[in-house]
Each structure stands twice: as C-alpha cells, then as structure tokens.
Amino acid sequence: MQSIALFNNKGGVSKTTTTFNLGWILAERGHRVILVDADPQCNLTGMVMGFTGMETLEEFYSHSSDRNIKSALQPVFESRPKVLDPVDCVQVKGRDGLFLMPGHIQLAEYEIQLGIAQELSGSIQALQNIPGSFNHLFTITAEVLQADYLIIDLSPGLGSINQNLVATADYLIVPTSPDIFSVMAIESLARVVPRWVKWAKRAADMDIFKEADYPFPEPNPKLLGALIQRYNLKGRKPTRAFQEYIDELGDVMMEKLKPALGSCDMLLPADRYKAAEFEAELRLASISDFNSLIAISQKKQKPVFSLNQPDVKRGGNLWDNTKKAIDAFHETFNDMAAKIESLTK
C-alpha cells in the first residue's frame, strides 16, 4: 500500500474534489483505493455519500457509529483497554475497488492531545501510542481491503494531525490555484514541511515510540508534485491573468519549495520526474475549472469525467461541447494517474 497525502495550508484549492477524482481514476485503472477523510469538515465524506446537510451526516453516524476515522482511534486517544481495529470502510457507489474511510467533525478534538503527545511523549509514557496510531490504523485497514493506494484528504491548517499525516505518508501532492495566496502558501510550506519531516525522523528514533504498541514509522515522504487548478481557459489556454500567477507559482516552487524539500530528502531522483514527463518541473498536472460540471458531479456522486448525457441533461451542440470538456478532464486525470503509477513503483 502506498499512501498519498494531499495537502496545502491554503483552502479553496480543490483538495477534496481532486482526492475523489484521483481515487476514482486509479480504481478505474484496476487499483484498489481507500479515500481517507482526515479533514474535520468532512467534505469528502459528504461528497462521496451524497450528504445534503448536517441531518444526513448525523443519521449516518447514529446508524454506523464506528465506521469513521475518529471512532476507530478512540481506544488510543481515550485510553480504552481495546486494540485498534480496521475501519469498516464504505464502498463508493458506482466504482468497484474504491472505498471511503469516513471523516468525523469531532476528529478536531484530538488535535491538542496529539500535539502534546508528539512534543512530550519522551517523558509521558501514557501518550506513547498516540503518534503512531494513525499510520497503524491506515495499515491494518489497507491490509483487510488489499488496497494499493490510500489517499488522504487533509484540512488547510498547520496543526498536529496534518503534521503527523504529511510526515508519515509515503508521498505528498500539493494542490494549488493560480492566485497570490497560493504563492504565499507555497512559501509557507517550504518553511514548515521540512520542519515536520525532521521532527518525524527524530520521533522515529526515540525508544519510547519504538516500544509503543503502535510504533511510530520511519518517515520517508516524497513529493509527487504540485497541481495547478481552478483557472479559466481562453482558446484552450489559461487566460493571461491566470497565466501570470501560474508562472509565479512555477518560480516559487523552483526557487523555494524544491530546495527546501531537497534539504530533507523529500524529492525523488530527477530522472524519475523526467521519465514521468511532467509538463513543467514539479508540476504533476494542470486542471482547469470544472465550471457548472462540478455541481452536477457532486449531485450525481461521481467524478466530472464520468458524467454522461442523462446526467448533464444537455443535447445537440451544447452536449457535443460538454462531452469534449468531459473527455478532456478524463484525459487529464488518466494522464495524472499514469504519472503517479510510474513515480510510485
């Protein structure tokens, strides 16, 4: 099982949508995939399961109280005399081989406790099992489902949960959008992520973590690449305003993110990226705005590239143009999936 974290400390960059679409296309290509909703906002859970509001979300929790990431971790965080069990993941409707580990709004309650455990466990033995519990839960769940990939949707923050999951994932994808805030976020990631990885390497060497029931794993995360998405096209190319920020994002990734991640051994060998035929250095893919298709996609609980004519309810030339857009998105995600397969071999 290869774990992939999608993370940016800036919100609104389509992390959740990309997690869903990427997991679907990898399953379509024959892999078994688990989508993990590690964002307390639970947008991925709502998207996959078609929740229309808090009432439907609460109904799921009341009938399936143990089928989520927070409940699965309770024995560790609440010191219960019970071992961790795999999560009974939800089969994603319409796509064989794709599963969801649902999120929980109350996962955020574990943020402070995890932070204390990660900083002070050298002297507080009662907390020694907490930092390694996420990785253990993911591993045993993946074993049950015989998963090839586990894709983690993270919240846009710099808290202890994101620190743990980014540092212990096998790979990292950084979604961005072409605006000044994404440029600033990349600069922030260049400072923060190396600190997280260096912390994780120290933690993995601590005897108290090695001797835990759920040992903290030896970290070795690698960058798969960045995504640039949510921009408008004109003549099949980004509009000039968006292109300027795309260029700026490219510059900051090369000048700040690449050397920063290189300093903590988070980059794959250069020939691996080259063999994957990136469109620009460190850029895994560019995905234009879904526009009106995103609302239909969410309503139908399927990716944009799987929508059909009955889904969109369009005919004639309008359907012809829509079909071209749908096919283009399928090509984009299929190409991205092929690159990920190549990079994670």
Image (cartoon, rainbow, N blue to C red):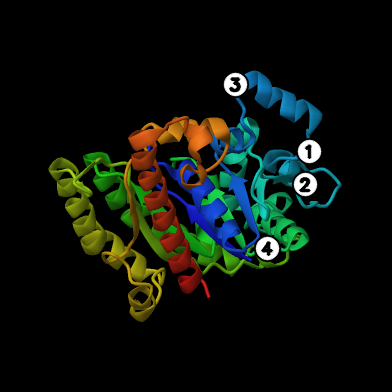
Tags 4 and 2 touching, CB below 8 Å: no
x, y percent for residue 245: 19, 47
x, y percent for residue 20: 53, 46
Q: Which residue is mark 2?
A: 88
Viewer-nearest of discs 4 and 3: 3
Viewer-nearest of discs 4 and 2: 2
Q: Which residue is mark 1?
A: 66
User: Is residue 320 toward the left or the right of residue 249 in the image?
Assistant: right
Mark pair 4, 3: CA separation: 43 Å
x, y percent for residue 41: 54, 32
Q: Residue at x 77, y 47 (%)?
A: 88
Mark pair 1, 4: CA separation: 29 Å
Which secondary structure, mark 2?
Answer: loop
Mark pair 4, 2: CA separation: 30 Å
* Relative to 199, residue 64 above or below: above
Q: Earlier in the sequence, mark 1 or mark 2?
A: 1
Who is closer to the viewer here, 219 or 44? 44
Q: Residue at x 41, y 57 (%)?
A: 331
x, y percent for residue 8: 40, 47
Which secondary structure, mark 4?
Answer: helix
Tags 3 and 2 touching, CB below 8 Å: no
Who is closer to the viewer here, 130 or 339? 339
**The N terminus appears in which quarter of the rendering?**
bottom right
Q: How many marks?
A: 4
Give the class, few, some or many, for how many residues have Cα within 10 Å of label 4's Cα (few <14, many ≥20).
Answer: some
Q: Examine the image and state in which quarter residue 73 appears.
A: top right
Q: Earlier in the sequence, mark 4 or mark 2?
A: 2
Viewer-nearest of discs 1 and 3: 3
Q: Which residue is mark 4?
A: 208
Residue 41 visible from this viewpoint: no
